[in-house]
Image (cartoon, rainbow, N blue to C red):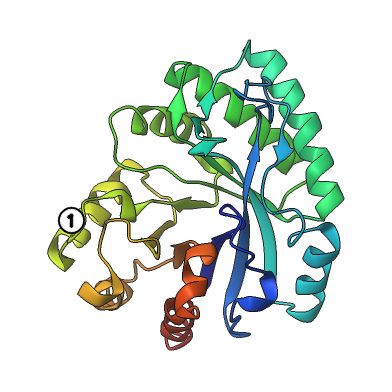
Amino acid sequence: MLFREYIGAEGKNVTFTDVPINPAVEFHFILSFTIDYTSSSPPRPTNGDFSAYWDTENFSPSQVSYVKVHHPNVKVAMSLAGDTVNDHHIFFEPASISSWVRNAISSITRIVKEYDLDGIDIDYEYFSADPDTFAECIGRLLYYLKQNQIVSFTSIAPYEDDSVQPHYLALWRKYGHLIDYVNFQFYAYKKGTTIFEFMRYFEIQSANYYGGKILVSFGTDGSGGLSPQNGFFRACSMLRDQGKLHGIFIWSADDSKEANFRYEKQSQEFLTSMI
């Protein structure tokens, strides 16, 4: 069973070795984030020319190599975009489809090879381009990366919002066959979500991303959705019994460090109980 965790976005001095890794699960760390913006003030879009914005001191190529050698069940991916850079929203803002794709292929291939990464995740949350342009840019990028065996898996990280979903649904309709996992941000729903509501949200998103492996999720940063305290693992048991549980992911290791990764341990123990 699959467990995934975003890591490195918040500069909280977390490391791979801090996080408990159960050898019986498939474990994906997702480095957060690589961004096609300058680091200037204000930051400016670079049309698909990506740079690593995660904590590169704690997550260097040698650290990636170390965790993979010592934990054969671990793979490491990187996530594109995210929410903000230097307190500015990160917009998907291509100059043209062909130029963005060309730049993205070049810069992402370089980073993947430098860090020996296994996959990529798409997490744009703001858009200056229409859904079809987003679908074409990301779809062509994923096609190239998979066709040329630069990455072995891909994921997208949508959430329920009228300005976000149309872009990811357009991508899914045309290029869903290239996407291995849907990291649906269930923690973007309201705080205090009930088990019943969560199960309904899961059914809605399973219909939206029909045929996809929808992963369930919660945040350890005080965000919304169904929390472990309110029944997240009970909902997981219900999905498991229906044959619909494909894995769990958490946002994020940076936030979990304070509580000593309590829910990372619990999530992995739950998943290993299914084997």
Name which residue lies at 39% across and 61% down.
Answer: 221
The spot of residue 141 in percent (x, y) is 67, 31
Name which residue lies at 78% across and 33% down.
Answer: 107
Q: Is residue 215 left or right of residue 198?
A: right
The spot of residue 59 in percent (x, y) is 74, 60
When the figure is inspected, residue 99 is found, relative to residue 217, above or below; the finding is above
Q: Quadrant of residue 271?
A: bottom left
The answer to whether any part of residue 51 appears in the image is yes
Name which residue lies at 40% across and 65% down.
Answer: 220
> Pointer 1: residues within 10 angstroms few (<14), some, or many (20+)?
few
- Write down the residue under mark 1: 200
**Label 1 SS:** helix
Q: Quadrant of residue 137?
A: top right
When the figure is inspected, residue 106 is found, relative to residue 9, above or below; the finding is above
Q: Residue furthest front?
A: 41
Name which residue lies at 29% across and 41% down.
Answer: 160
Q: Is residue 105 left or right of residue 167?
A: right
Q: Nearer the viewer, residue 215 or 103?
A: 103
When the figure is inspected, residue 49 is found, relative to residue 111, above or below; the finding is above
Q: Nearer the viewer, residue 161 or 149?
A: 161
Q: Quadrant of residue 139?
A: top right
